[in-house]
Image (cartoon, rainbow, N blue to C red):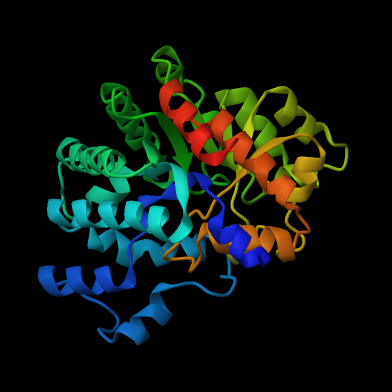
Amino acid sequence: MTAEERIRALPKAELHRHIEGCVRTGTVLDLARKHDLKLPTFDPAGLDLVYKLRAPGASLAEVLGRFDLAQASFASYEAVERITGEALEDAYKKENIRLLELRYSPDFMFRKAGLDWQKAHDIINAAAVKFEKNSNMVCGLIVIASRNYGLDSAERTMDFAVKNKRTVIGFDLADNEADNPSSLYKEAVKKLHAAGMPLTVHSGEEGNYSQVAETIKALGPRRIGHGVKAADDASGRTLELIKNSGITVETNPWSNYLTRAVPSIEAHPLKKFIKAGVKCSIGADDPEILDTHLNKEYALAVEKMGLSFEDLRYTLGCAVAGSFLPPEKKRQAAKELGA
């Protein structure tokens, strides 16, 4: 069996995947026609070129700008249901994922069409519950506050997540960390901790490694999204802080290359994380927009970063242990993954 075949056959876990980044090109086209939305082109091949990022963007901000077409696609409750169902289907059938945490920002996804957050969330949750019953994949939903929408939006989103604690397994702070540092949210996250809601934070995807330490000290997250800049600390103290805090780093290699968080795939610090004993998982982040999937991410890890299959199994064990899913679902995932 070739390495590629072994990777395809390997049951996988995904902790860092945005629903907004899972909208298929064909779905963008179908929904644009149905809801009379504007597109740069209605030619499938032409739209694919515009919609998907296949080479590094100028910056993280430039890459995030590509999500406008995906955002517009959440034009109705039916669209929300379809996109969620397709995201689940692709993860299960194309990537052999057995543990999937899907995250989304209600303010980002629903503001353009003015959809009711609660109704849309209930639709997303119902799709995940239905998919679980008809497969051997376990799922969970994480709600995101988009930093770029300001503190008021973040607090409203936190209140929404806590209100829906029964169907929301965790909370995430995402978007531009440089202009919206973690210290701004120090007081706001107290309501999450009080409710026992696990926190993950996009940190160290841009800027300086000091931001990762600030995030850990100010917010007390259980996981860090991306975290690549932590490896830039020559003293090793930031990686030691992550390790000693029991934090799992959700790495996303191809995404980090496309956003210029790392200069090359070979330079990605995933192997350094593993060597330092840091808990870490591998994710695809935004598979449709970034033209990736977990099979590709694993292949890059093996072929470009020098990871062994034992290293891949280590990341799977970290993913199960670091998952925000309830214990019974984690046990099922561990059995499926052999972790």
Query: On the picture, is 276 further left or further right than 93?
Result: right
Task: Residue at the far front: name it.
Answer: 1
Q: Quadrant of residue 177?
A: top right
Residue 283 makes an appearance in the image? yes
Look at 23% across and 49% down and name the residue there.
Answer: 110
Estimate the x, y position of residue 332 in percent, counting from the top left: 45, 31
Estimate the x, y position of residue 30 in percent, counting from the top left: 19, 72
From this view, report whether residue 225 is shown above or below residue 309: above
Residue 208 makes an appearance in the image? no
Rendered-image quadrant of the N terminus? bottom right
Task: Residue at the far top: name it.
Answer: 194
Look at 32% across and 72% down and name the residue there.
Answer: 25
Q: Quadrant of residue 182?
A: top right
Q: Which residue is nearer to you in this view: 297 or 120?
A: 297
Query: On the picture, is 234 further left or further right than 282?
Result: right
Estimate the x, y position of residue 280 in percent, counting from the top left: 65, 40
Rendered-image quadrant of the C terminus? top right
Estimate the x, y position of residue 257 in percent, counting from the top left: 64, 63
Look at 67% across and 48% down and name the residue there.
Answer: 312
Look at 70% across and 64% down and name the residue there.
Answer: 265
Q: Quadrant of residue 76?
A: bottom left
| Count of numbered marks | 0
Query: On the picture, is 160 further left or further right than 142?
Result: left
From this view, report whether residue 206 is shown above or below residue 51: above
Q: Which residue is nearer to you in this view: 325 or 19?
A: 325
